[in-house]
Amino acid sequence: MQHVYFVSFGCQMNVLDSELVLGDFERSGYKQTDAMASADVVLINTCSIREHAEDKVWSLLGRARQVKQAKPHLKIGVMGCMAQRVKDEIIRRAPHVDLVLGTSNFRSAVQDLEDIGAGGGRVVRAAKRPDPEFLPDADRNVGSRPDAYRAYVTIMRGCNHSCTYCIVPHTRGKEVSRPMGELLAECRALVADGVREITFLGQNINTYGQDLHPERKHTGEICTLLEQASAIDGLDRIRFLTSNPFDMTEDMMRRFGEIPKVMPWLHIPAQSGSDTVLARMQRTYTVAQYHEVVGWARKHIPGVEITSDFIVGFSGETDEDFERTKALVRDVGFMQCYVFKYSLRPMTISARRMPDDVPEDIKKRRNVELLAVQDETAEARNKTLLGQRLEILIEGISKSDPTRVTGRDMGNRIVHCEGDASMAGRMAVVEIEEVGAHSLIGRRVALEDEAGRWTYRSYGHAVPSATA
Ligand code: SAH
Ligand code: F3S
């Protein structure tokens, strides 16, 4: 029995790519191991979005070299954005790496390792186009998933935008959408295997399908996909990310709001609350336009929760710019924000044209300050949920308290309530009793049984059928 030690860095797309590769390993009889020392294969799925993410990979590769010294048959592979971006450097700096697979060519991993095992040498596949024999999304092993009830589905790869700070268009190339029929078939297979919630992934889902049907520009092909997916019996919840402020229309928001299975949750990265900074980032919208998009969401999707990404300390960002970002966070009232310190990435537009001129200590301070504003806003908003009833999909036992289970409500908030492992995969209604900035705790007032029927506990009042 061969063992693979697999590490995945970065975004949701990487999480899914890792799952696809691990599905291939599982099919070929490999087992996963938590200990590098007992592995026959070490494979790292890498991220290039910030320098820090790449540093971690270099240090992991250092550890793998030591293990390989004691165990020469160990094979080491690097896949993902960093493998695409710095393949030459990996080949030069890390002669112990046997396999380098770029962002379009990673499904050959098992085959390549077998070839290397048989014939020796190294394999490097970093062509922009996938090898037709090993298409990134083909033939998914749906049974190999970390989460029994929720799954990701990649609907498109790459990005056609050119935000000046961003390495993704370099590492993942231009937008390539997957045909709708193929996506729906994958969803059906996942649902047949027990999945109740699917999250569609793309760097900018707003333009899904435009490369396949240029004549359908601005028709909201993503909405058609959501409408068709919602017809799948047994699929209860649909989410998607990322919806950017650009390429979004009010009509798309209206259609999202009309599909009951589409959850009231949108990830709309703002990046900054200053028009000057947004222009330097080439985000192509102003703060006023961002507010307009949020307004459409709130008008057409009842109870919608919005999450966002921000970069602090981008080139030229002044204290005033940063104050505007804090104001945006307060004004919108996000459920959650991810805040990143600007990290200069070689080959990006900002690396070529704009100095990385905000000192590290100021980036750090702004990062902490913005998160504090976000936490304060989120906690105040969450307080309005006290006493309310939320429908959650239970994921399993809580990591921090074994007497509780954890799930997500329709707005994607983390909710804990009393329960046990047998409840995983079922819906429950929870009356909220305690709130923090990042999660809610409540008592379970209703639980769906294994047959999908609701059972009510005697707390004195019936649970509304709409459950929200
Ligand atoms: N459209 C993508 C964005 C990918 S990058 C998506 O689907 O999420 C994820 C986040 O990383 C971005 O929204 C941005 O906030 C952050 N980021 C990207 N490049 C960065 C850089 N050079 N430095 C710091 N943060 C960055
Ligand atoms: Fe990056 Fe902007 Fe695309 S953040 S992934 S270039 S939308």
Image (cartoon, rainbow, N blue to C red):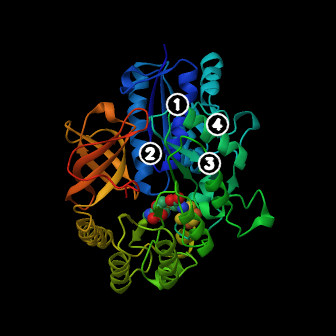
Could you say which disc has been placed on residue 231 in the image?
A: 3
Real-space CA distance between mark 3 and mark 1, rounded to the nearest whole angstrom: 30 Å
Of 31 and 141, nearer the camera is 141
Callout 2 amino acid: Phe
Tag 4 near tag 1, CB within 8 Å: no
Q: Which of pointers 3 and 1 indicates the residue nearer the eye?
A: 3
Q: In the shown orientation, is residue 446 left or right of residue 452?
A: left
335 lies above or below 362: above
Tell me the mark number nearer the camera, choosing from 4 and 2. Answer: 2
Earlier in the chain: of badge 4 and badge 3, it is 4
In the displayed structure, 74 sits above or below 14; it is above
Q: Which residue is mark 2?
A: 9
Q: Nearer the viewer, residue 446 or 249?
A: 446
- Asked if the residue under mark 2 is in contact with the one under mark 1, i.e. CB atoms within 8 Å, the reply is no
Q: Residues within 10 Å of mark 4 (few under 14, many from 20)?
A: many
Secondary structure under the numbered disc 4 in the rendered image: strand
* Residue wearing tag 1: 22
Q: CA distance from mark 1 to mark 2?
A: 14 Å
User: Which labelled disc corresponds to residue 124?
Assistant: 4
- Amino acid type assigned to the residue bearing label 1 in the image: Leu
